[in-house]
Image (cartoon, rainbow, N blue to C red):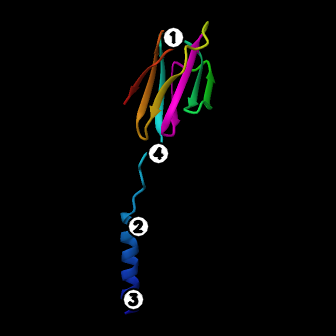
Amino acid sequence: MKTRFKIGICLLLAAGFAACDKDETPVVGQLKVEYINMEATFVSIYTEAGNEIYSKQNPKSNFTVDLNPGNYAILSGSSGSSGSGKEYFQIQAGRTTRASYHNSGTPIINYE
């Protein structure tokens, strides 16, 4: 009787562990920044409250930043300019937001 009980407990535990899958719900989103026909000298990302959370001098032509869901602003400048104002965007969990700069300091924001 004890043996059957032990086997039963082992089978229940095995079934329970097999049923547990890793939670794959995304908790962050991505910001992809690309510069087309433009060379930036700096880029900064701010929270909605105005706190700078990311800053980089001479960024590559394309780069990606993982961010928590929320509202943000991006400011970027090229040689001879100090940036043309913050452009606001939103990050959603598991989604990608693209900021494309085309020959100017103001990005085109697309949500994918």
Stretch in magenta: 60-78
Quarter of the rendering containing residue 76: top right
User: Which numbered disc, 3 or 1, marks the residue closer to the eye?
Assistant: 1
User: Which numbered disc, 3 or 2, marks the residue closer to the eye?
Assistant: 2
Of residues 68 and 24, the one nearer the viewer is: 68
Relative vertical location of residue 106 with respect to residue 32 in this rendering, above or below:
above
- Marks 4 and 1 in Cβ contact (< 8 Å): no
Please name the residue that numbered disc 3 is placed on: 3
Pick whichever of labels 2 and 1 is earlier in the sequence. Answer: 2
In three-dimensional space, the C-alpha distance between marks 4 and 1, rounded to whole angstroms, equals 32 Å
Relative vertical location of residue 89 with respect to residue 60 in this rendering, above or below:
below
The residue positioned farthest toward the top in the image shown: 80
Residue 14 % position (x, y): 39, 71
Q: Residue at x 60, y 30 (%)?
A: 50
Please name the residue that numbered disc 1 is placed on: 38
Residue 53 % position (x, y): 61, 32
Please name the residue that numbered disc 2 is placed on: 17
Q: Could you tell me the amino acid type at mark 4?
A: Val
Q: Could you tell me the amino acid type at mark 1?
A: Met
Q: Quadrant of the N terminus?
A: bottom left
Of residues 31 and 7, the one nearer the viewer is: 31
Residue 107 in magenta?
no
Quarter of the rendering containing residue 52: top right
- Marks 4 and 2 in Cβ contact (< 8 Å): no
The residue positioned farthest toward the bottom in the image shown: 1
Q: Quadrant of the C terminus?
A: top left
In three-dimensional space, the C-alpha distance between marks 4 and 2, rounded to whole angstroms, equals 24 Å
Pick whichever of labels 3 and 1 is earlier in the sequence. Answer: 3
| Label 3 CA crowd tier, 10 Å (few <14, some 14–19, many 20+) | few
